[in-house]
Amino acid sequence: MKKRTIEYKIADVVLILGFAFLLSILGFAIAEAKDNLRFYNKLADDLSIVEVCDSKKLTGEMLRNRNGHIIIEKTIGKVTNDDLDGRILNYISRDYDYISYKNVEGAKKGDIILTYSIYNPDTDYEDDIIARYDYIIDRAQ
C-alpha cells in the first residue's frame, strides 16, 4: 500500500511540475502579448488618423484635405428660437455660425448644446458628416 501511495505522489509532483511549466510559458506569452499591445497602441496613436477639432480651429482646407483621416468637430451652440435654429458659439467665421437643433430631443430655446460631428474619412467633402451626436449641456432658465 505504501508503494502505491508513493507512485501517486510522484505522479502528482510530475503533474504539478508540468502545470507550473505550462503556466510559465503562458506567463511569457501574456507578457509578450502585453508588450505587443503597448507597441500597437503607440503605433495607432502615432498614426494620428483621428483628430478632435474645435469648430473655431477647423477650416474648409482641413476638411478638403483629410485624406482618409477621421475628423471629429466639437461644436458648442445655443438654440436661438422655438424652431430650434441655433448659433454656433465657437465659430471660425460669422459666415458659418448656423446650426439646426431640430433633431435634438428635448431641446428648447436658450439651451446650450455640445455637438460632435464625425466627417466621412472616405471623402474630402466639407459637408460629408457620417454621424452627429448632440448633448444638452445647459438648460434655459
Image: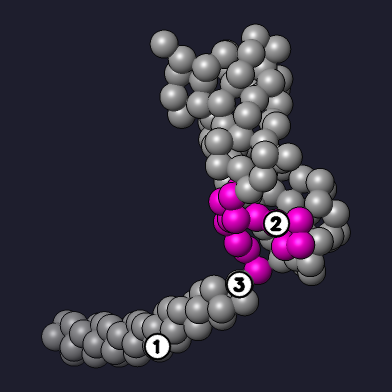
Q: Earlier in the sequence, mark 3 or mark 2?
A: 3
Residue at left offset 73%, top offset 40%: 95
Of the 4 image quadrants, the one containing the N terminus is: bottom left
Distance (Cα) linking label 2 and label 1: 48 Å
Please report whichever mark, 2 or 1, sits nearer to the chain's N-terminal start. 1
Q: Which mark is residue 48?
A: 3
Q: Quadrant of the C terminus?
A: top left
Position of 96 with respect to 108 (left or right) is right
Which mark's residue is nearer the viewer, 3 or 1? 3
Judged from this view, the residue extending furthest toward the left is 2
Q: Amino acid at mark 2?
A: Thr
Circle 2 or circle 1, nearest the eye: 2
Q: CA distance from mark 3 to mark 2?
A: 18 Å
Q: Is residue 140 above or below residue 78?
A: above
Q: Mark 1: which secondary structure?
A: helix
Where does residue 25 sit, x and y in percent of width and height?
40, 88
Of 39 and 31, the residue lying toward us: 39
Q: Amino acid at mark 3?
A: Ser
Residue placed under numbered mark 1 in the picture: 28
Residue 26 visible to the viewer:
no
Return the residue at label 2.
Answer: 59
26 or 22: which is nearer to us? 26
In-front residue for pair 98/29 = 98
Q: Residue at x 67, y 17 (%)?
A: 84
Q: Amino acid at mark 1?
A: Phe
The image quarter containing residue 34 is: bottom left
Task: State the image coordinates of residue 98 (x, y, percent, origin top left).
Answer: 70, 32
Which portion, as a residue range, is magenta?
49-63
